[in-house]
Image (tube, rainbow, N blue to C red):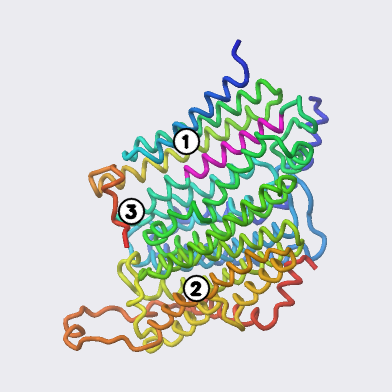
Amino acid sequence: MIGLEHYITVSSLLFAIGFFGVLLRKNTLVIYMCLELMLNAANLGLIAFSRYHGGMGGNLFVFFIITVAAAEVAVGLAIIVALFRKRQTVEVEELNALRN
Amino acid sequence: MSPEFYQKIAETNQWGAIAPELALGILALSLLLLEIILPKVAHGAIPRIAILGQLAILVYAIANSCSGACVTGEAFGGMLFFDATGELFRVFFLGSSVFVSYLGMVSLEKKTLPQVEYYHILLVVTAALMLLAQANHFVMLFVALEAATVGFYILVSYFRHSVVSLEAGLKYLIMGALSSAILLFGIVLLYGAGSNPALEASSRDPLNFGNLEIFLAANSGDMLGLLGMLLVISGVAFKVGAFPFQIWIPDVYQGAPIPTTALLAIASKGAGFAMLLSLVQVFSPLSDWLVPLLSALAVLTILFGNFAALTQRNLKRVIGLSGVSHAGFLLIGVVAATKVEWATTAVMFYLFAYLLASIAVFAVFAHLEKEDDSEISLDDLGDLAKKNGFLGMALAIGIGSLAGIPPLAGFIGKMLIFVAALEAELYGLMAVAVVGAVVSIYYYFGILKSAFFEVWHFQDDDEDAPEEAEPGASLQFFGKVAILAAVAGTLILGFYQSPLSSWLSGG
């Protein structure tokens, strides 16, 4: 029988994978996917809590998060593409114009 | 749920109470419309229209700020909460956005970039920040915060032909999205804790601040709630640039266009503290954990900000790191606010003093007339006082107020925070703050030294050097008014605080 704790475990795992992905990966696009993974981990958690505890607040919040994530992707990818046109790279280590 | 229930919720929609935000949104849209309607020659008027419109809204907001009968309490089904502090933050954000519009006018004129969009996004961000300061529900908080943050991503990377601006945008994007995700997961955990029907005082709407506070008071040992509080505070600490989360500040401040740097330094910091002040209230049942956490953050933030600023030569980096230490001082005020009620007023006073001083300093930076504004260093201030005495005076007053030199407003702000900390018996924090204030004088006076004292020039260097524009060449009437207002405000608040403080405490 799959219960609430299973969903929350998966959600926490997804969040952790995304978090460490952002910290450890070097490719900007992969980092960006990890950020989206973290948002979706939150979505899964909200839906599970909402389903098992009753109440629609969590389900409703998920719609807002999806919308926000879409806006963030639109802006973020635009910045990454503009930067790629200038520098011909999306590797974090090679993006080092800002050093004192 | 019966129709009467929805009827009741709909009746709490008090649209009149959010008139300033609505007006800002309409103004933002009409700017885009004006760009289509007006002939090309008249496009120069659009920034002026934006500034005048904002000034009108600012006057309305000040006139309406709880002097007489005004709307207080919850509205929009518990999404927003109107009180005096929210009104003050409205004025704060509007003031900073008027000033940033002016800076945008100065620095965008030199570029071949679309201009109107900058003001459009700026106005939308300001409206979002104003709603954020009055949020009373985590859904509202998150959506308003993201509306502002996504706008910030665009504003930071607005100079899209410059690699540094784009890189700063990317860094801010990754850091900002990371902090939002952490904040969001914290909210999810709080939702999970507060909606659990097995626990006492659980609620069907646990993301409402009031409901959550009641729940946390009944279950102060709940692990899920505690973890959620930790993640939410970490997410907010990113936004204010408190210690382990300050790594993005120097790079982003350096790469962003000057108007955006000013907006980040003033409005983004103010928004972080607006959130913290209301969250401290929500999490007050957990203050056994919250107070040590915030105190540790404050100590590390003050020490890091001041010592890291000592070795910098780039002016925007220095100001960024000094902003980190100011965040530390404000955090002390927030900690004190958990015990002493009027400490909130001290935090607000400090923020307004910081706003005025930053206006003076950033206006000087924008008028140094450097081609590449990510490379303004201490050397570019050379002989500023001799070349343009007005800008030199503004810089001296602004920096002096940031450093907390009496009799300027920054000194009174620091003193109010100290007195609040004393009353709350936070002696350790006070000691660290004094050390930080002393260290900060070194780098602030480094800035003044390079502006006021002769720099050695090699004679033949001067002959080869291309003619650079004199500082202050593009200073216009509105700029002079803005600088004068900031300087006068800083001086007056240093001597005579009672009007502002009585206004701040809602009297």
Pointer 2 indicates a residue of which chain? B
Q: Is there any visible trace of residue B29 in the rendered image? A: no
Instruction: Name the secondary structure under disc 3.
Output: loop
Q: Position of residue B336 (x, y in %)?
A: 70, 61
Q: Report which residue position mark 3 lands on.
A: B160
Q: Is there any visible trace of residue B148 in the rendered image? A: yes
Q: Residue at x 19, y 83 (%)?
A: B461
Query: Residue B32, relative to residue B56: is it above or below?
Result: above
Q: Nearer the viewer, residue B346 or B485?
A: B346
Q: Position of residue B209 (x, y in %)?
A: 72, 43
Q: Which residues are magenta?
A: B177-195
Question: Would residue B57 appear left or right of B99 to someone viewing this image?
Answer: right
Pointer 1 indicates a residue of which chain? A
Q: Report which residue position mark 2 lands on.
A: B440
Q: Nearer the viewer, mark 1 or mark 2?
A: 2
Looking at the rendered structure, whether the residues under marks 1 and 2 are on a common chain is answered as no
Q: Residue at x 48, y 79 (%)?
A: B477
Instruction: Name the secondary structure under disc 1.
Output: helix
Instruction: Name the secondary structure under disc 2.
Output: helix
Residue type for callout 2:
Ser
Query: Residue A90, relative to residue A11: is it above or below?
Result: below
Q: Residue at x 71, y 23 (%)?
A: A54
Residue type for callout 3:
Arg
Question: Would residue B437 appear left or right of B466 to someone viewing this image?
Answer: right
Residue type for callout 1:
Ala
Res. B38 image quadrant:
bottom left
| Magenta segment main secondary structure | helix
The label number, if any, that marks residue A70 in the structure image: 1
For the N terminus of chain B, the quadrant is: top right
Q: Nearer the viewer, mark 3 or mark 2?
A: 2
- Distance Cα–Cα, label 1 vs label 2: 42 Å
